[in-house]
Amino acid sequence: MESYSGCILVEDASGSRVCVFEYRARLLFLPVRRYVLDTGEPVRRLDRRTFEILGTGERLVRADD
């Protein structure tokens, strides 16, 4: 069963901010995380601060507030 974990505020190269939604689940005993934009586009986490939109390759970085 998958559950909503939270929203990570990120920004693109032009400075526009969007939320990446994180969902968590378990596959057998392994934790699984899934990231998507509010539009439903899948996002891959590259490291602690960087995400990539799978369809376009656009990079997003965490916004520091």
Image: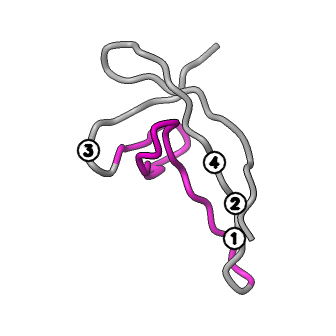
- First in sequence: mark 3 or mark 2? 2
Q: Which residue is mark 2?
A: 24
The stretch drawn in magenta includes residue 33: yes
Q: Residues within 10 Å of mark 1 (few under 14, many from 20)?
A: few
Q: Amino acid at mark 4?
A: Glu
Helix, strand or loop at label 4? It is strand
Q: Which residue is mark 3?
A: 57
Q: Which residues are magenta?
A: 29-53
Q: Amino acid at mark 2?
A: Arg
Q: Are marks 2 and 1 in contact (CB under 8 Å)?
A: yes
Distance from the alpha carbon under mark 3 to that under mark 2: 23 Å
Q: Are marks 2 and 4 in contact (CB under 8 Å)?
A: yes
Q: Which residue is mark 4?
A: 22
Q: Amino acid at mark 1?
A: Pro
Above or below — where is 1 with respect to 38? below
Q: Which residue is mark 1?
A: 31
Q: Nearer the viewer, residue 64 or 55?
A: 55
